[in-house]
Image: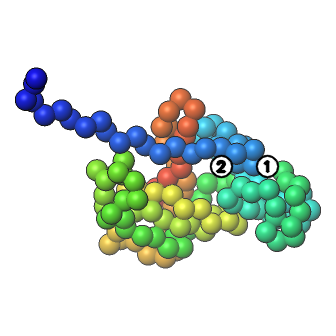
Amino acid sequence: MSTAATTPPAPERPLPTPTRESQPYWDGLREGRLMLQHCARCGKARHYPRPVCPHCFSMESTWREAPLGGRIHSWTVCHHPFNFFFKSMAPYIVALVDMDAGVRVNAPLRGIAADALKIGVPVRLAFEPVTRDVMLPYFVAA
């Protein structure tokens, strides 16, 4: 029997599980585009994707490409990640951004120090390839 310690396997990165409603959003990210769901009745954009419009309760929607810019609404510095995969990245920033398209999106923020952050700082959405099929969003300085 070997006395050498074995290294535990690295934790797996959590990945999204697309739904019928969210698949066009994930397909858009994979193509480097932000696709937003719009209500076919009242026309309002909604994010996160879901089957019912929160404004008029219509179940009909269309998808449109949206601009990638926005401004920081809020942020948090994560010192204790919710998932072991992110432990080596801590501390990291997750930003809530008012997108120019009229929705709020939260995603990691990279390349801006926490002490330089202010509400209203312009940012843009970027895309991180994670697997052949999955691209995840993050924000960078505009």
In the image, what residue type sits under mark 2?
A: Leu
Vertical comparison of 28 with 88: above or below = above
Residue at 87% over, 58% down: 59
| Upstream in sequence: badge 2 or badge 1 | 2
Whole-angstrom CA distance, mark 2 to mark 1, is 10 Å
Left or right: residue 116 versus residue 37 is left
Q: Residue furthest top?
A: 1
Q: Residue furthest front?
A: 1
In the picture, the disc for residue 34 is 2
Quadrant assignment for the N terminus: top left
Q: Secondary structure at mark 2?
A: strand
In the image, what residue type sits under mark 1?
A: Trp
Task: Choose between 74 and 71: the one closer to the eye.
Answer: 74
Q: Secondary structure at mark 1?
A: strand
Q: Is residue 28 visible?
A: no
In the picture, the disc for residue 63 is 1
Density class for disc 2 (Cα within 10 Å; few <14, some 14-19, many ≥20) is many
Density class for disc 1 (Cα within 10 Å; few <14, some 14-19, many ≥20) is some
| Residue 130 picture location, percent across and down | 48, 37
Vertical comparison of 39 with 55: above or below = above
Vertical comparison of 138 with 119: above or below = above
Left or right: residue 63 versus residue 83 is right
Task: Choose between 96 and 52: the one closer to the eye.
Answer: 52
Q: Residue furthest right?
A: 41
